[in-house]
Amino acid sequence: MKVIHLVSELRQWRKEVGSGRVVLVPTMGALHEGHLKLIEVARELAGPKGQVGVSIFVNPLQFGPNEDFGRYPRELEADCARCESAAADVVFAPSVDEVYPKDRSVIILETSLSKVLCGASRPGHFDGVGTVVAKLFNYFTPDDAVFGTKDYQQLAIIRRMVRDLNFPLAIHGVDTVREPDGLAMSSRNRYLSTNERSEAPALRGALQLIREAFHAGETSAATLRGLALNHLSANAPSGALDYLELVDAENLQPVAEVNSHTVVAVAYRFSKARLIDNLELA
Ligand code: PAF
């Protein structure tokens, strides 16, 4: 497996691999089982003759001024070992200066899907995500890219960007990998205190309550939301709700009546970690 830090070297690598299928897994590192699942899916898509590229880049553009950019875990050596054992072919780990010219002045601005849910509480976050992902697509010119569905909104925005700007690749969403107690795997779970960690599975619990009530015939979004909020305040009292919304799977706008095209999205703040999760009612 190659580890590349410079765009010029990545371009050279891309030329050398030629017309074989190239599948990209964009990450910010601190890789866990969820990322390894993405690499596994990428490997299957690439086949034995194709190439799997993993990018590892903590993207400053997607962090707000009071967010965790400075303390976001960086563990490149261990991450490279994980990528190698997952049969990736190349890791691209550029510096911030390599990615962003000092006088950069062009960004990707999504104007609809990015205004709700996480976008409402993290202004500018998805401009940063869109911009870096567009750059990664330009560096790798992949045939496919693989993202987790845990970041449902991110995936929807990337799909929209690819559609609207005609990036010539296919986007694949991969199911969230969970701890045995249901907590969605995340690089930020390590910020939880022992007590917060014991409360965090309540996010999944709240989503499952909604699913059960929906399958039992309840379709009022307000009623379903109320059930979930009660569950969270009873079972995760150390944290605070950022949002819990029942939205249309495509346009991410809140719905009053729930159907199989509804997604429930939740964000919850603990002292040092803001966790997200979601559930597709389909
Ligand atoms: O999901 C992430 O890890 C990041 O948002 C991404 C897609 C790698 C862009 O920095």
Image (tube, helix red, strand yellow):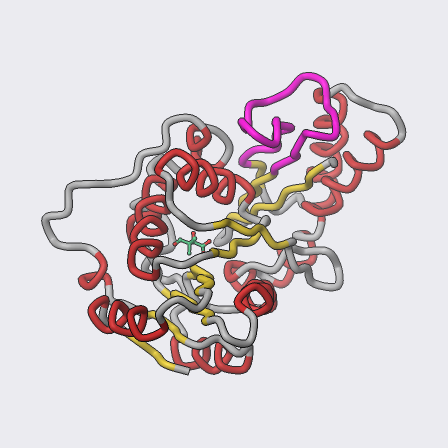
Spot occupied by residue 276 in the image (x, y as percentages of width and height):
57, 46
Quarter where residue 32 is shown:
bottom right
Q: Is residue 63 visible?
A: no
Q: Quadrant of the C terminus?
A: top right
Is 21 on the left or on the right of 194, as rendered?
A: left
Relative placement, left or right, of 256 versus 18 is right
**In which image quadrant can residue 53 be found?**
bottom left
Q: Compare residues 170 and 72 and report the one nearer the observer.
A: 170
Q: Is residue 134 magenta?
A: no
Q: Which residues are magenta?
A: 242-265
Does 74 appear above or below 275? below
Q: Nearer the viewer, residue 237 or 18?
A: 18
Could you say where residue 232 lies in the image, as x and y percent from the top left? 70, 39
Coordinates of residue 27 in the picture (x, y in percent): 44, 61
Query: Residue at the front extreme?
Result: 19
Q: Is residue 244 magenta?
A: yes
